[in-house]
Structure formats: C-alpha cells, structure tokens
Image (spheres, grey):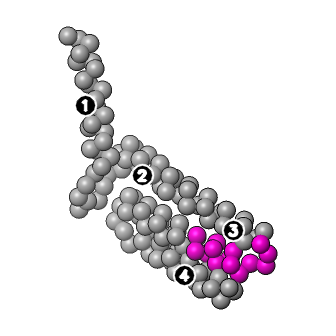
C-alpha cells in the first residue's frame, strides 16, 4: 500500500505542475481558472489519497480523505463564483473564444424580467 500511496502522490504532484503551466500559458482569466481548478483539484486529491494510503495511522488517512472530499466539493464552486464575478465585473473573454454562456444566460434573464413589466403596462 505504501508504494501505491507514493505513486498517487507523484501523480498528484504532476497534475499540480501541469496546472501551473496552464496558469502561465493560457490566454485569459477563464481558461486559466479552468486549468487551475481541474489540475489542482485532481492533483491535490491524488496527493491526499496517496497520503491516506501511506500514512502512519487510520485516523490520519480518514482525515486526508475528508480533506479530499472537501476540496472536491468546494473547488469547483469557488471557481464558478470567481468566473461569474469576473464576467459581471466586465472581464472580456479571449477574442478566439467561441461560446459565452454567461452572456446567453444574462440575455434570457433580461428577457424574462422584461416580460412581466410589459404585461403590467397593458
């Protein structure tokens, strides 16, 4: 089990390193946020699972697994909140971006809000 734990730690470190390359190489905040979230979440979870397998006691392993579950639940939510805040703050997408789902959603919300106001004025 210890060797498997060390292997998972090494894989996790590689994921974290690739995530840092994404932070440096990708063109805009949204792509960088995606690279950071996916790579660092997977990397950190692999590291924590590896620590759980190679740790000194069962309690140590349980705490590492609980930390991995916490990261899996909170990291995507935090990334979404950061991306939404950046979009609302006016941070533009890369010029070669194809889809802007936040803009499409904002248009639908504006249309939905305008419909009741139009009925009230009739």
Residue 106 at x, y percent in the picture? 31, 39
Give the main secondary structure of the magenta stretch.
helix
Range shown magenta:
45-58
Alpha-carbon neighbours of circle 3 within 10 Å: few (<14), some, or many (≥20)? many
Mark 2 highlights which residue? 83
In the displayed structure, does residue 57 sit left or right of residue 89? right
Q: Secondary structure at mark 1?
A: helix
Q: Could you classify mark 1 by the number of other residues whose Cα lies within 10 Å: few (under 14), some (14-19), or many (20 or more)?
A: few
C-alpha separation, residue under disc 2 versus residue under disc 1: 23 Å
> Would you say residue 98 is visible in this rendering?
yes
Q: Position of residue 4 (x, y in %)?
A: 62, 85
Which residue is drawn at the image coordinates 63% and 74% (left, top)? 49
- Residue 116 painted magenta: no
Label drawn at residue 11: 4
Q: CA distance from mark 3 to mark 4?
A: 16 Å
Q: Is residue 58 above or below residue 7?
A: above
Q: Is residue 82 in view?
A: no
Number of the label disc, if any, that sits on residue 111:
1
| Residue positioned 59% across, 81% down in the render | 8
Q: How far apart, in angstroms, are the residues tagged by discs 3 and 2?
A: 28 Å
- On screen, 18 above or below 59? below
């Amino acid at each position: 089990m210890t060797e498997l734990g060390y292997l998972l730690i090494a894989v996790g470190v590689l994921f974290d390193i690739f995530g840092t390359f994404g932070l440096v190489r990708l063109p805009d905040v949204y792509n960088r946020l995606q690279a950071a979230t996916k790579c660092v979440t997977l990397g950190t979870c692999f590291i924590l699972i590896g620590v759980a397998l190679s740790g000194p006691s069962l309690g140590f392993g349980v705490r590492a697994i609980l930390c991995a579950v916490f990261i899996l639940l909170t990291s995507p939510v935090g990334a979404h909140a950061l991306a939404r805040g950046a979009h609302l703050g006016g941070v533009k997408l890369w010029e070669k971006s194809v889809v802007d789902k936040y803009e499409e959603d904002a248009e639908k919300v504006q249309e939905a809000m305008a419909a009741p106001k139009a009925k009230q004025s009739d």
